[in-house]
Image (tube, helix red, strand yellow):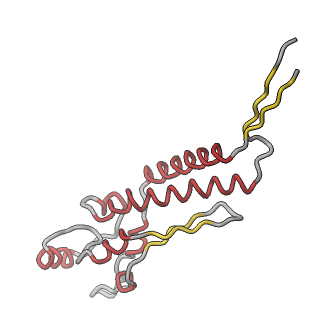
């Protein structure tokens, strides 16, 4: 007589809710990673080129250098940078695979400002949230790894002996 043991992990018995929960766990991890590791790069030298920020006027650049002594992108006094980097609130949905991260900064920083020429100024909100191609790919891979890890952890293992 030969004894055979079959071990099943997951499979068709996985419910849509388990899969949605796993994907949301992956998305939540990606938002945390984005806020902790990628957002600070928006306020460093070279970020304007990397993320495609709107060009600033020469007069603004001269005034910023003279008054503030630096040319860091998206930074005048550092208040908005500090507020954006301080915290992120993450919300996920129970019925849908979705995660949303919310960062906080005073509204005056994102007000629609007009230049002296009458043209609108740069969209600071869009510039803070911009991601580069390589970053999007890294976030997608991170989401997939975390979702898989979460799903493997919550899946039930069934073992049965076939004689």
Q: Is residue 44 left or right of residue 97?
A: left
Q: 150 left or right of 7?
A: left
Q: Residue at x 33, y 62 (%)?
A: 40
Report the residue at 38% width, 56% height from top: 37
Quarter of the image with the N terminus is: top right
**Quadrant assignment, res 127:** bottom left
In x, y percent, where is residue 147? 60, 49
Q: Front-most of 128 and 81? A: 81
| Image location of residue 130, percent across then percent down | 42, 64
Q: Quadrant of the C terminus?
A: top right
Count of numbered badges drawn on the protein: 0
Rendering coords of residue 53 (x, y %)? 34, 67
- State whether residue 106 is above or below residue 19: below
Q: Is residue 73 above or below residue 6?
A: below
Query: Of all residues shown, which one is farthest toward the top?
Result: 1
Tell me which corner region of the image, top left, top right, bottom left or bottom right, holds residue 45. bottom left
Q: Which quadrant would residue 145 be assigned to in this image?
A: top right
Residue for point 39% across, 69% down: 128
């Amino acid at each position: 007589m030969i004894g055979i043991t079959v071990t099943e992990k997951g499979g068709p018995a996985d419910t849509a809710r388990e899969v949605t929960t796993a994907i949301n766990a992956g998305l939540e991890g990606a938002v945390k990673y984005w806020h902790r590791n990628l957002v600070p790069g928006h306020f460093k030298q070279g970020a304007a080129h990397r993320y495609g920020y709107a060009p600033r006027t020469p007069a603004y650049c001269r005034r910023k250098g003279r008054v503030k002594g630096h040319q860091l992108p998206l930074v005048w006094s550092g208040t908005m940078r500090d507020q954006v980097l301080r915290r992120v609130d993450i919300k996920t949905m129970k019925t849908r695979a979705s995660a949303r991260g919310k960062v906080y900064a005073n509204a005056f920083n994102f007000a629609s400002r007009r230049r002296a020429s009458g043209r609108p100024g740069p969209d600071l909100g869009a510039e803070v949230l911009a991601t580069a191609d390589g970053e999007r790919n890294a976030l997608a891979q991170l989401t997939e790894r975390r979702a898989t890890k979460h799903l493997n952890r919550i899946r039930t293992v069934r073992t049965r002996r076939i004689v």
